[in-house]
Amino acid sequence: MNKKILLSVIVLLIFSVSIYSSTVKIWAMGEEAKQLGKIASVFEEQNPDITIDVQAIPWDNAYDKLLTGIAARRLPDIAQMGTTWMAGFGAMGVFEELTPYIEKSDIITEDHFFDASWQTVSLQDGIYGIPWYVDIRVMFYRTDLLKEAGYDKAPDNWEELYEISKKLAGRKGNYGISLMTNEVQQFFPFVWQNGGRILDDEGNITVDSPEFIEAIEYYARFFKEDISPKGGGGNIIQEFASGYTPIYFSGPWMVSLTRQQTPQIDGKWDVALMPKKESRTSFIGGSNWVLFKTSKNKEDAWKFIEFMSSHDTQLEWYNILASLPAVKSVWEEPALAEKPMISLFGEQLKDARAPLTIPEYEEIARAISRRLEEACYGVKTPEEAALAMKRDIEKILR
Amino acid sequence: MKRSSIIIITFLLLFALTLFGQAIIRDMEITEGINNDNTGAKFELNENYVYSGKHSVKVIPSGKAPETKMAFELSGESLLNWKAHNTLELSIYFEENLETVPNSYFLGMADITDGWQWVDGVFTRKEVENGWNVISYKLSPKMINVDKNGKYMLYFSFFLEDEEKIPLKDPFYVDHCNALTPGESKVREYIWSLSTVEEIETFDNDNTGATFEFNKKYVGSGSGSMKVIPSGEAVETKIAAKIPTDKYELWKESNQLIMRVFLPEEMEKLPTQFFFGMADLTDGWQWVGGVFSEIDKVTPGWNDIPFKLSGDMQKLKSEGKYKVYIAFIGYEGGDKAPLTDPFYVDGIYAITTEKITREEKIAMVPAQIKEEVKKLTEMGDDELLEAIQEKTFQYFWEEANPENGLVKDRSSDDSPCSIAAVGFGLSSIPVAIESGWITKEEGYNWALTTLKTFANGGVEGKKGFYYHFVNMETGKRALSSEISSIDTSLFIAGALTVGQYFEGTELNKLAVELYKKVDWRWMLAGGNTLSMGWKPEAGFLGARWDSFNEGILAYVLAIGSPTHLIPASTWDNIYRPVHDTYIQLPQETLFVYQYPNVWVDFRNKVDHYANYFNNAAVASCYNWLFTFSNRFQYETYTEDIWGLSACDGPNGYKAYGASEGNHDGTIAPYASLASIPFTPDLSINSLRAMLEDQGALIWNKYGFVSGYNVDTNWYSEENIGIDQGDLLLMIENYQTGMIWEYFMKVPNIQTALRKIGFKEKDVEYAVTPEYAKEFEELKMAPSQKEAFAKKADKTIKIDGTLKEWEVAEKYVVDEDMNVPAGGIQIVNKREQILHSYFYIKWNEDNLYIAAEVYDEYLVINFGPDAKGGFYQTDSVEFYIDPSKAGSNAGLLKLAILPFDTENNPHAARHEDANPGPVEEVAPDIEYATEKTDYGYNLEVKIPFKYLKINPRSGTKLGFSYTIHNSNKEDAQPGQYVRENILSWTSIPEVWASPDKWGTLILE
């Protein structure tokens, strides 16, 4: 075949595809964007008349990219949406409300997913997304160093966490735990574990409740007593491996990263559930799918969301990227259930909470983070910090 | 008196006035010159009840006249003070249990410059209390607009009206007649007014034995004062009290407090020294600081004792507790001696700008404005828009000089003319005629007068261009402004529009003549883009219209010029950065997108780059989304109210925009409204919400004011000509397309658009797909960069001094090389210095890098235990990708913190093949830094063994260099404070994109 003919065949092929098929455009971020193609090809096989076009959006630019897309009404059909961004973008009125789709769906129902995960798609007046994957914080700890200090299991409750990390901090030049002075995702679990909340059911601000204040006090104590470094942000994996900070809280991605980057501590670390106070509540994050109102291809786009939510795809996706399935049934699969570290994440998912799903959330989190930092630095007492948080939040919610 | 002493006295007087920030109209220290306007009242000086100074004036009514009056002349200095303000205040004291207390207060004014002529009067009713009261007269425009060389009489009338007027019998006291502008003028605010028994009981004597009594004989504020009876034994007499917590805010803002003290004539020994001390009682007792009053001399009677608060004394924590101690010290023969006689303290106050609440401001708005706003809110869209246009038009009609047609830049009295405002005004004439606000003849004559002024040399300029600002009467250059290319363009656009409306007339000809006169080629200033302007002192300005902004209007006119045209290729010399979906002005100042669209009908037209109408639509929507996203941070922004653009703000006129670091909660009402052709729904929502929520405060005789800020409770009272024009004309385009219609009929405009390459095309996008692709490539161009490293001929000592590098080739990272990223601001070139030169050399074993970092403010907030995360504060990073040289060593990314809090540098490998502090993971890397007057220097040695390569001449490595910057002066230890990122390869996520780094070539 000479070149010209080949070319015209290709042109014809492209032409015919464009007549008979539709394209679902997707924006995805980070690693997900890189790997999504693998699973999308399975979908394309099953749906030969639909083409999936994935555009990778760097996380760092994602917020602005969404804004400029909305401004120009040039958006994809669907997008990956971080759980904490749902309410903010939702308020701009750009997401399709999905109840009518869900009612017709054989795959997607509320109880298909973890409760805490479903919370993140339920905004004030409807369902504006479908959970994709979750992440959840647990405790990472060095089994060997704890043993040296005289403990043969992970700290089980607040008291033990304080006691053990304090003891570990006694090792010269090292600390006992790594916390961040201004990271609300690390801090909120302590609030929840103590029965505290930012807002109660009636919407009253409760950051000055005794439970909340006690959580600030407990958290700040790690910095005041030099149990956790204040300097923040070194390389957590390296510092974990060197023993500089033998306990920290983080998500599932750290499991594989630790194995890859610091093989020297294989077998010397483990994960454990969050420490118990009244509960062991942890922070749930992750990403959802959203369908844009501007989409001209909603049916096919929804089909893809359904595909991504099926038991099999969720399992497959776990195999590809090891990100945690939002679909409950997948956790019974041996690939997850029989791996102790992973199944622990599943266990923790049963006691997890998503932060507020109101548009003001990001701003409230910023205010809390700022005041929390002041408490950690000792600029404010926990009570003062809590009162300042309350004032800030009152202003935000005005 | 010698001249120099007069000057000194004048200076002192002025100083005193600014110090107290009040424009005294009459201080009531003498009774001469006060008359009763035939009401029989008598006037006496009094020293018991004194609001300021040594005396007040006691007014003794006749007991017969229905109104008691006081009159005095207003001229000279006091008239100047009068003119600058809109409110007159008079303090009045009433004793207890009076039979007749006035409830009505009238202030009248007559012009006596030449005879006697009534000016105007204002009336206020007030139920007064015992003690000191302030009567506030809101002056009418007629009363404010006085001739500064004239002479006037003020008539104060006091009366009691209860169905009929009851003659006053009881004397009262008046003091401190002063003019001010609420919210702007400095006023007294009391920390302690010492007017009640309860307040006096909060004072103790700090063990000096003094006793305190409530007293009503001498009163400077409220209805009582504190009598201090010294023990006669303690060498210092003291009063002490806790600072009331509700006064903390006031306290923190005040650097001086003033204590009013009455020292009776009969005192044997006067206190001559006053000490003000302060302690922190939050947690135990801790001394904060103290000051002696700087007062020179006290005399019997009332005295103002000032205390300057030093730094620490102003820093109150909201949760803290504080106590002040004031000592009164007398001397005898050079030694401290106990005071023996009582004296009176009445009030300790700060001088601040009076805080008036939003509600108070609303209460002060004239009823007629409120009524007008209410009517507007009840109108349908079309009627509403037209009502706004008509009101807005009044600006051009009333703020123009009818003699020459020049229009004021802004509504303030002393504003010069802005030639841009003239252009907007001319364009509004057809609208006014068609709407029936003026007759065709009026409009024609006005426009003709204006154009004749320009054509006959009545406006100073050069080569057909004019000065940006000129005098309203003479047309001569004002404010040292420049010969302005854009403002001349706006004027010409207006002239052509109105000329085209009157097609075939003298006016039309004159407009074309003015257009022909403009020598656009001269404005190229020897380059290939238009200069922004020219000044006689400096020649052409350095700045050019070389990136996307309102300047594209100037190019359309210049390329279409019938006489001095510039090549259409200049259009392509404009840099057009693409922000994902539209061409952007990075500052996102909204008017920039609007102005070209006021005249040029860009609908359904596409050039190589964009559809500029759609582009403005996207930018408008982005402007809304930006405030929407920030609405929890600023009360001014709501779901519906948006519009960030150039306008007056709490800190003056500013080119606000929808970008980080370029907004402060100030909304320009014109901005969202002028986007109405692009975003009708968003614009009307914004308009209605503004009227509903803020209406009374942002509406005046010319429609919307320039700007407002709810967060700082600041509302402009002025209107700006170009804002008025922008919104008026854009509403017209939205409704009838009239401005587009006439401007597009100008033949040369069509020629220009054709030459540029505009095609008729109905498209949905803003940026053409071709240009979007081109720009994407342009953006990636940094990855095509190359740097060359010479071989080092001698050893390089890593010590932070760069003397070995003097001859090395220099590479630059400058203020323009910003890495786009969330939460990161673009370097503000006007306010910041941030750039770096770097140098690279090599030998068989090592790669050497040196850099000079220019940074006007170095943040040092990481302690000596810092191990990583340096990017969170002032630091740099070098990225090396050895895979280009065939090595499998993986990336080496070296992060350097130039100084910790003990001034030592730190280095770490960060997010690369072997991360960690270099001491642990790459101990043979050496690094050093040195502070310099411009920032710092740094030097690094990286052994090639870490890159696993054997370097040769011609070896290529992937390379980049990134600077993280913060200017946060109160950075907490370890806090994440990064504000800017610059990079030699300034692409998004440069740190994680080795494929987009540049290339380092060993020579």
Image (cartoon, grey):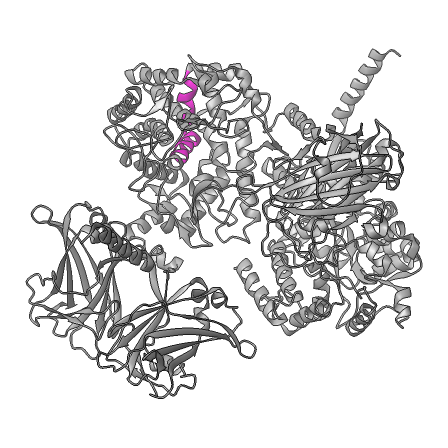
A318 part of magenta stretch: no
Horizontally, residue B585 falls left or right of residue B436, namely right
Count of labels shown?
Answer: 0
Q: Which segment is the magenta one?
A: B725-746
Residue at (20% x, 67% y) in the render = B174
Q: Residue at x 64, y 60 (%)?
A: A369
Q: Is residue A104 left or right of residue B489?
A: right
Q: Farthest residue to the front: give it.
A: B333
Q: Nearer the viewer, residue B15 or B635?
A: B15
- Residue B351 falls in which quadrant of the image? bottom left
Q: Residue at x 75, y 38 (%)?
A: B849
Figure quadrant of residue B932: top right
On the rendered image, what quadrant is the N terminus of chain B found in? bottom left
The percent coordinates of residue B17 (x first, y second) are 29, 57
Quadrant containing the C terminus of chain B in the rendered view: top right
Most common SS among magenta residues: helix
Residue B40 lies, in percent from the top left, at: 6, 67
B859 or B221: nearer the viewer:
B859
